[in-house]
Amino acid sequence: MAVYNGGDALSASLESIATQTFTDWEMVVVDDASTDRTREVVESWGRKDPRIRLVTNAGNKGQTPCLNQGLRECRGDWVARQDADDLSAPGRLAAQMDFVVRHPEVALLGTSGILIDERGCKAGLLDVPSTAAGIAWTSMFLNPFLHTSVLFQRETSLETFGGYDESFRIAQDYDLWVRMLNAAPTANLPERLVSYRRSDASLSRAGRELAMQEAGRVASRQFSHLIGRSPEAGERRLCDAFRSGLPGAACPEFRSLWRRLECEFSARHPAWADGPAAVAASWHLRLAGSSGSALSAVSEMRDALVADPGFVLRWIRDRLG
């Protein structure tokens, strides 16, 4: 965990790790010269649970250098990430460790999640692709992993890929995961094992713009890698809009792009021909939320059901649960 001014949510976040059913872990918390009670909160937890270890910076370095600092401090073969205001379900680490023990070739493993508001109330669902083909397809448009959910091989991330690229301030995880998935097997568990806290104040307008710019850099690079050509200006514009919240009027144009890229993707990667289909239902649901009209939303919901009725039924159950 890299933290700067963790605030009121920090203690609950640490508690969600301290109460994991899997117990063979250490928690390295890199405090980036916080000016609030962050250090006091972590030290208090460390006295109760010596598995929680605090590293304090004398000056503020920024998140990406702190993430690499934390990687170097970790002593385990596997590293799990969690942000300071997010939560892990009690069985998260047990489920992930069980999976990688059974699939030792996997270098990176994420999970689906729940979106919560500042009060901790459910505000939405966070779905990630659960197949290798779906992860590859999604990586051209969006980060296919929730940063706060990942478990990954420490040595592979550091020695092979050099850790997080410190030229990225915000999309450093997207960049690293894409580099890893292009060279090693990766996976996602469909279970919702983390809660990601959405804070309207978490990023300034400039920060949001930078996040979109950095994500666009990674997505365009991955587009070129998987499709074999650079995205055209119009394609990049639509993909950027999809990441930030596609306006309803642009949905038909994006769907047309989606179908064209399906053909190119499948032709270049026949073993992954089901990649687009694997994530179609979740994307139709995403488009339904930004369609701008009830009729369009119903149409997208119908297409989601056609693509994967089981996924949609689980989505509705989780949404109402």
Image (cartoon, helix red, strand yellow):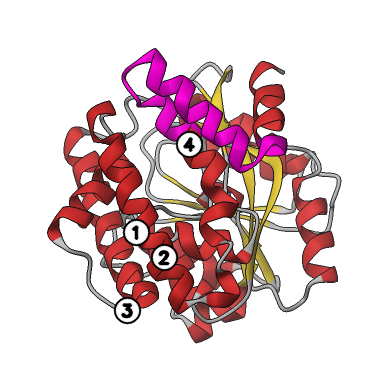
Question: Which secondary structure class fits the magenta region best?
Answer: helix
Q: Which label sits on residue 284?
A: 4
N-terminal of the pair, mark 1 or mark 4, is 1
- Mark whose residue sits in front, 2 or 4: 2
Residues tagged 1 and 3 counted as in contact (Cβ below 8 A): no
Q: Which label sits on residue 263?
A: 2
Marks 4 and 3, Cα distance to the nearest angstrom? 26 Å
Helix, strand or loop at label 4? It is helix
Marks 1 and 3, Cα distance to the nearest angstrom? 14 Å
Residues tagged 1 and 4 counted as in contact (Cβ below 8 A): no
Helix, strand or loop at label 1? It is helix
Q: In which quarter of the image is residue 97?
A: bottom right
Residues tagged 2 and 1 counted as in contact (Cβ below 8 A): yes
Residue 196, percent across and down? 54, 35
10 Å crowding of disc 2: few (<14), some (14-19), many (20+): some
Kindly identify the residue that appears in the image at 57 percent across and 48 percent down: 128
Kindly identify the residue that appears in the image at 52 percent across and 85 percent down: 159
Marks 2 and 4, Cα distance to the nearest angstrom? 18 Å
Amino acid carrying label 3: it is Gly
Per the rendered image, the range of residues in magenta is 285-311
Amino acid carrying label 1: it is Arg
* For residue 275, above or below residue 318: below
Amino acid carrying label 2: it is Cys
Kindly identify the residue that appears in the image at 53 percent across and 16 percent down: 119
Instruction: Report whether 18 appears left or right of 249.
Output: right
